[in-house]
Amino acid sequence: MLVNLKEIKENKPLQLNEKLEILSHNLNLDGNIRLLDKEYELKAKVDAKATLTCDYCLINITHNISFNIEEILETEDEALEEFNLSPIISAYIHEHLPMQILCKEECLGLCKTCGINLNKKSCDCPNINEDSPFSKLLDLDF
């Protein structure tokens, strides 16, 4: 998202009310950029519908995130006419995404042998993985 910072005057902030797609996520950005002495300050609220992939079963899910941005914009004189806000917004999106993405808390994932989605069907594959270094633990008698 490109903005022209030269349009912003001391007592007239640039209003932002945008629908954007950044990193394949649809988001609404509502806020402003104002001039403070010689710095530009971005204050905005972002509501996003993030399209993510479940870490266990690999299906696509939609995750809603909301966050506020308060950022002093670091500018160079030649970048004032076309200042790109997308890298700042992208960083905030990454910061607010969950560390582990699951379609549901009790997601069973994929079968390690045949690859079937265990949330939809069950399979007859044996549960023991002989190649695992932990398979010897099954032989212990407690």
Image (cartoon, rainbow, N blue to C red):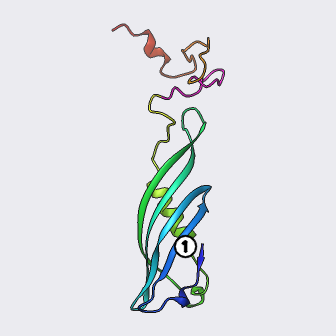
* Residue 54, horizontal then vertical, whole percent: 55, 38
Specify whether 95 is left or right of 57.
left
Kind of element beneath mark 1: loop
- Residue shown at the point (52%, 26%) measured from the top left: 108
| Rendered view: 141 above or below 78 | above
* Residue 26, horizontal then vertical, whole percent: 58, 57
Tell which residue pokes out farthest to the right in this image.
114
Q: Which residue is mark 1?
A: 85
The kind of secondary structure the magenta stretch mainly shows is loop
- Residue shown at the point (57%, 87%) measured from the top left: 80
116 magenta-colored:
yes
The one of 117 and 7 positioned closer to us in this rendering: 7
Specify whether 21 is left or right of 96.
right
* Residue 118, horizontal then vertical, whole percent: 57, 22
The one of 115 and 105 positioned closer to us in this rendering: 105
Q: Quadrant of residue 10?
A: bottom left
> What crowding class fits label 1: few (fewer than 14 Cα within 10 Å), some (14-19), or many (20 or more)?
few
Give the residues in magenta.
Answer: 107-118
Of the residues shown, which amino acid type is indicated by label 1? Answer: Leu
